[in-house]
Image: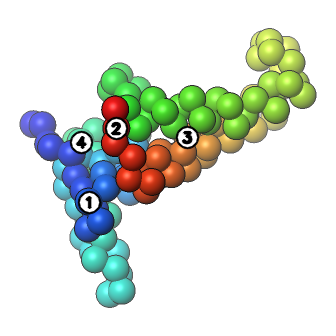
């Protein structure tokens, strides 16, 4: 089953409430009495029924821009720890991966909230 991209009340694409990627599909229900956001989820999360990012999905334009931003934002860790991840200890790798994931989600939201055309 394929869903069309979902938009927020402001007309911007919605962000998946589960994985942070661009939402396409279904809402989970109104988040609170003060918010009409139905907590949109993407097609993959709705199909899986749990929080698993779909690595096989091709990145949208927003996600591709966000990935570039996230890589740039974690650059200082690479400068500090060196460019060969095989030489990093487990804590350094976990910090890098965690920050990359968080920065990616933040950058997706930033690009979408700016209301920029996705091309």
Q: Which of the marked residues, 1 or 2, is nearer the chain's N terminus?
A: 1
Q: CA distance from mark 1 to mark 2?
A: 13 Å
Q: Is residue 110 left or right of residue 45?
A: right
Viewer-closest of 115 and 110: 115
- Residue located at (53% from left, 31% from top): 67
Q: Which residue is mark 2?
A: 118
Rendered location of residue 85, percent (x, y): 77, 17
Q: Is residue 8 above or below residue 118?
A: below
Q: Is residue 70 above or below residue 46?
A: above
- Residue located at (43% from left, 35% from top): 63
- Residue located at (9% from left, 36% from top): 1
Q: Is residue 78 left or right of residue 1?
A: right
Disc number lying in front (1 or 3) = 1
Rendered location of residue 62, percent (x, y): 41, 38
How crowded is the residue under tag 3: few (<14 C-alpha within 10 Å), some, or many (20+)? many
Give the label on residue 43, or none: 4
Work out whether residue 97 can be spotted. no
- Residue located at (49% from left, 33% from top): 65
Q: Which residue is mark 1?
A: 11
Disc number lying in front (4 or 2) = 2
How crowded is the residue under tag 1: few (<14 C-alpha within 10 Å), some, or many (20+)? few
Q: Which of the marked residues, 3 or 2, is nearer the chain's N terminus?
A: 3
């Amino acid at each position: 089953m394929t869903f069309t991209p979902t938009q927020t009340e402001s007309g911007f694409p919605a962000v998946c409430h589960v994985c942070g990627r661009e939402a396409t599909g279904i809402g989970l229900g109104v988040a609170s009495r003060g918010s009409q956001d139905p907590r949109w989820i993407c097609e993959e999360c709705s199909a899986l029924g749990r929080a698993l990012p779909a690595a096989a999905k091709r990145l949208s334009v927003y996600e591709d821009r966000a990935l570039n931003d996230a890589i740039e934002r974690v650059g200082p860790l690479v400068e500090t720890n060196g460019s060969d991840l095989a030489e990093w200890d487990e804590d350094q790798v976990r910090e890098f991966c965690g920050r990359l994931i968080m920065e990616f989600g933040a950058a997706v939201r930033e690009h979408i909230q700016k209301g920029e055309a996705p091309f």
